[in-house]
Image: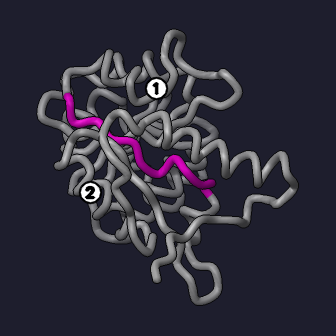
Amino acid sequence: MKIAVIGSGNVGGALAVKFVQKGHTVLIGAKFPLSDKSIALAQKIGEDRFTSVEHAVKQCEVIVLATPAPLAVEVAQSLGDTSGKVIIDTMNIVMGRGPQGFTNTADAILAHTATREVVKCFNTTGFNNMQNTQYGNTVIDCFVAGDSERGKEIAQQLALDAGFGACYAIGGNDKFQLMEQFAWFWINLAMFQGQGREIAFKLLKR
């Protein structure tokens, strides 16, 4: 797949490395390509992958948004023409810090871009769990929500490519908020209840 990762921070960087390792064509779209914070990532995947946001989007069929939640509207508006493209939203509104007038970032993206193929995925755990999905003999799971069946299928495949054991679809656009609440559940345990970042979720069946 041709994937534009918008944002070169912890989450975008972790996913970009995994996607490159699986042989996907990955471009990193950034407002300031090869800024100081991008150098470490560039050393891992190559400087030639860094470009402007609009150019990355134009060249790719899948767009992964991994920027701070308060910038969701600004970033969506910077993408250019997204017609026919799939957007995977990895962001969360945490402690009220998000796009004004929206309860979740995916709805904000839908309101400010052309494509209707928007899903939320890779938002329910920490970037450390994207870098290493293994806990002993267990591989952790991922989750996705959205009305777009195509988008969910692509996100599920990319989750497997990133090393997750499975990626479960939990519903349509009406579950965007639930996905962010699940993310807050992980954040609460990890940060506020003292469990630390090295915790993760696995769906068990009997």
In percent of width and height, residue 142 lies at: 46, 61
Q: SS for tag 1?
A: loop
37, above or below 13, in the image:
above
99, above or below 169, in the image:
above
Q: Which residue is mark 2?
A: 25
Relative side of 45 to 85, left or right: right
The extreme top residue here reads 101
Q: SS for tag 2?
A: strand
For residue 108, which quarter of the picture? Answer: top left
Tell me the amino acid under the disc marked 1.
Lys
Q: Which residue is mark 1?
A: 31
**Residue at x 32%, y 16% (from the top left corner):** 111
Membership of 185 in magenta stretch: no
C-alpha span from label 2 to label 1: 20 Å
**Residue at x 51%, y 47% (from the top left corner):** 123
Relative side of 200 to 193, left or right: left
The extreme bottom residue here reads 137
In percent of width and height, residue 51 lies at: 36, 36
Q: Nearer the viewer, residue 20 or 44?
A: 20
Q: Nearer the viewer, residue 48 or 65?
A: 65
In percent of width and height, residue 8 lies at: 52, 43
What is the quadrant of the N terminus in the image? bottom left
